Image (cartoon, rainbow, N blue to C red):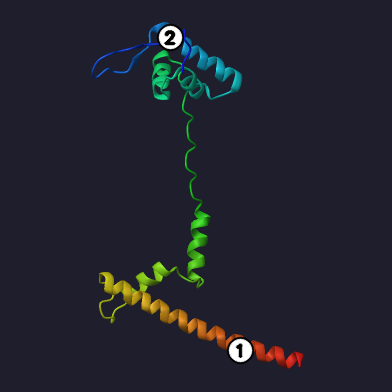
Amino acid sequence: MGNKETQPEKKSGKGSGGVRYDASQKKEILKFIEDYNEKNGRGGQSAAAAQYGVSVLTLINWQKQDGTAPKAKKSKPAKKKRKSAVKKRKVSAKKGKKRSPRKTAKKAAGKKGRVNAGVGFAGKIQAILSQISSNEKTISKLEASNKSLKQKLKRSIG
């Protein structure tokens, strides 16, 4: 698995903590990682883990102790929302755009005069039924409009 020169000692007996590497072995492996990264840009830890049979986590710990660990890139701060975008959303909601089913359900559940409206499961069912009824009315209007347009088209063609 690893180089014969860098074969570490294995502890024997119960509860052995695993493999122990001496300072020269660690230096050799860390040097391998550094050389590999210089040549290829990245991937030295994975290559060293495969070649020497050392866990990547162990290699990272060694690099931290040695001060050669790669620095984590700083993330970019989140972009702030523009006020104009928020205003546009408010304006479009006022212009009569269709509400999402969830918002419609909440609105229907909040209306007074409905039996069990807004009370747990029953209120949700009532809101869904209300939405279905509304959708059916819309469909019937569209079907009537469609029928009318077909008749106009037939008259204009024939």
User: Which residue is label 1 attached to?
Assistant: 147
- The answer to whether residue 78 is left or right of residue 22 is right
User: Which residue is label 2 attached to?
Assistant: 25
Q: Which callout, 2 or 1, points at the residue further toward the start of the chain?
A: 2
Q: Residue at x 37, y 71 (%)?
A: 105
Q: In the image, residue 15 lies at what x, y percent? A: 24, 19
Any mark on residue 79, and which?
none
Local secondary structure at mark 1: helix
Observer-nearest of 98 and 94: 98
Residue 118 visible to an observer of this rendering:
no
Looking at the figure, which quarter contains the C terminus? Answer: bottom right
Rate crowding at label 2 as few (under 14), some (14 to 19) or many (20 or more) other CA atoms within 10 Å.
some
- Mark 2 vs 1: CB contact within 8 A: no
> Which amino acid type corresponds to the residue marked 2 in the rendered image?
Gln
Q: Calculate the distance from the C-alpha at mark 2 to the C-alpha at mark 1.
A: 84 Å
Q: In the image, residue 120 lies at what x, y percent? A: 26, 69
Instruction: Indicate whether 110 appears above or below 138.
Output: above
Q: Residue furthest left?
A: 14
> Which amino acid type corresponds to the residue marked 1 in the rendered image?
Lys
Rate crowding at label 1 as few (under 14), some (14 to 19) or many (20 or more) other CA atoms within 10 Å.
few
Q: Residue at x 61, y 85 (%)?
A: 146
Q: In the image, residue 45 lies at what x, y percent? A: 48, 22
Q: Residue at x 71, y 91 (%)?
A: 154
Tag in front: 2 or 1: 2
Q: In the image, residue 134 lies at what x, y percent? A: 44, 80
